[in-house]
Image: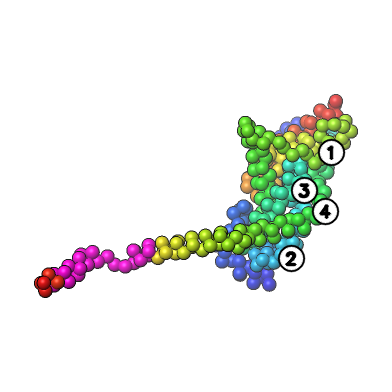
């Protein structure tokens, strides 16, 4: 079945462009699911969402600070996956790498738009409040994790994305580089700066 | 390289690669393990990096709201039907799309005809002229 799928998809006119397809691996469950999604199988799509949605949602949530915004982003990302499924080439990038790359791009784009909007004189400058526990009041009651979440949210976008992608310890810097469309050295540099910033803030709070 | 510089380098690599030395490139991992074994400062840095990694891992977690997967799938289904619905839900839009298609097909036919039918400008003049000549002769 998987070979049939591979043969059927081998002729595709163009690879999915959100990720460079340089990562080689054996056809796996995700490839088989993508082939079924390409044929319009909604159950396969639901399975794909169940497999990768929660991690994508967590990444977007911690990047944006809002569960609602994160869900919009993840919905848009899966819509792109659905539309591009016919062009998916098994044996290329992992589905998770591609999906996370889309999610990071959407997060960064959204943040950029929000930043630009703040400078427009007649624009709607309302930003949805963070879903996390009260950002203004009860600051002293918030535990360290909430403070670190605020610190992470204050990091530059790409440092934040690299740090969040590395947080569960499951991805190598090479994987993260693919997700960010960057080099491994650049990812190392982002992680060094992000971790130094967080450590300095932690130390400052402990001293205070 | 003296131990002070080794420690500085180790601190930098801890930030770049994380505290799980087992995931580092083999040569660097071996050097890091040796440094941790003999240097209290290296052990302190490693423990600090582990603590930061644990805090960040916890901070990066986010609970998924109930019904999340269902909403994502439903969203994609509704977008699919919206795309087709845009065309089929409105007779006017459907007619306009059909008319546009016909006009485009006609324009394409004319364009193809203009390119593929051989030009007969010179001969054509002669052919058109000859009946006239014969008509004048008859009169």
Q: Are marks 2 and 3 on the same chain?
A: yes
Residue position for label 4: B66
On the rendered structure, is A177 left or right of B104?
Answer: right
The reply to whether the magenta stretch includes residue A60 is no
Q: Residue at x 73, y 56 (%)?
A: B72
Give the class, few, some or many, for how many residues have Cα within 10 Å of label 4's Cα (few <14, many ≥20): few
**Mark found first going from the N terminus, 2 or 3:** 2
Of B1 and A58, the residue lying toward us: A58
**Residue A43 bears which disc, if any?**
2
Labelled pair 4, 3 in contact (Cβ < 8 Å): no
On the rendered structure, is B120 left or right of B69?
Answer: left
Q: Are marks 1 and 4 on the same chain?
A: no
From this viewpoint, which residue is outermost toward the right?
Answer: A141
Which chain hosts label 1?
Answer: A
Q: Nearer the viewer, mark 1 or mark 3?
A: 1
Q: Residue at x 56, y 66 (%)?
A: A11
Q: Residue at x 69, y 55 (%)?
A: A78
Q: Secondary structure at mark 1?
A: loop
For the residues labelled 4 and 3, the Cα–Cα distance comes to 13 Å
Q: Nearer the viewer, mark 4 or mark 3?
A: 4
Q: Nearer the viewer, mark 2 or mark 3?
A: 2
Residue position for label 1: A133
């Amino acid at each position: 079945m998987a070979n049939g799928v591979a043969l059927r998809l081998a002729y595709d006119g163009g690879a999915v462009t959100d990720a460079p397809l340089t990562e080689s691996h054996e056809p796996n469950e995700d490839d088989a699911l993508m082939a079924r999604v390409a044929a319009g199988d909604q159950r396969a799509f639901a399975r794909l969402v169940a497999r990768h949605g929660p991690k994508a949602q967590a990444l977007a949530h911690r990047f944006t600070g809002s569960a609602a915004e994160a869900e919009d982003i993840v919905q848009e990302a899966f819509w792109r996956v659905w539309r591009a499924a016919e062009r998916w080439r098994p044996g290329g990038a992992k589905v998770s790498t591609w999906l996370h790359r889309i999610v990071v791009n959407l997060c960064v784009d959204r943040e950029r738009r929000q930043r630009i909007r703040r400078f427009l004189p007649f624009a709607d400058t309302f930003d949805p409040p963070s879903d996390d526990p009260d950002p203004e009041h009860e600051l002293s009651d918030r535990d360290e994790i909430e403070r670190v979440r605020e610190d992470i949210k204050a990091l530059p976008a790409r440092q934040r994305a690299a740090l969040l992608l590395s947080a569960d310890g499951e991805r190598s810097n090479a994987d993260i580089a693919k997700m960010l469309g960057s080099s491994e050295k650049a990812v190392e540099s982002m992680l060094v700066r992000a971790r130094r910033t967080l450590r300095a803030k932690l130390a400052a709070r402990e001293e205070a | 390289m003296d131990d002070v510089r080794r420690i500085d380098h180790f601190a930098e690599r801890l930030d770049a690669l994380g505290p799980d030395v087992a995931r580092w490139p083999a040569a660097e991992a071996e050097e890091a393990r040796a440094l941790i074994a003999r240097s209290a400062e290296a052990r302190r840095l490693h423990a600090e990096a582990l603590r930061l990694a644990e805090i960040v891992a916890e901070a990066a977690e986010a609970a998924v709201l109930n019904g999340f997967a269902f909403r994502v799938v439903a969203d994609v289904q509704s977008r699919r039907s919206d795309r087709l619905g845009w065309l089929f839900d409105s007779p006017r839009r459907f007619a306009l799309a059909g008319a546009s298609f016909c006009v485009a097909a006609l324009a394409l036919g004319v364009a193809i005809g203009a390119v593929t039918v051989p030009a007969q400008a010179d001969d054509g003049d002669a052919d058109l002229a000859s009946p006239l000549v014969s008509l004048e002769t008859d009169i």
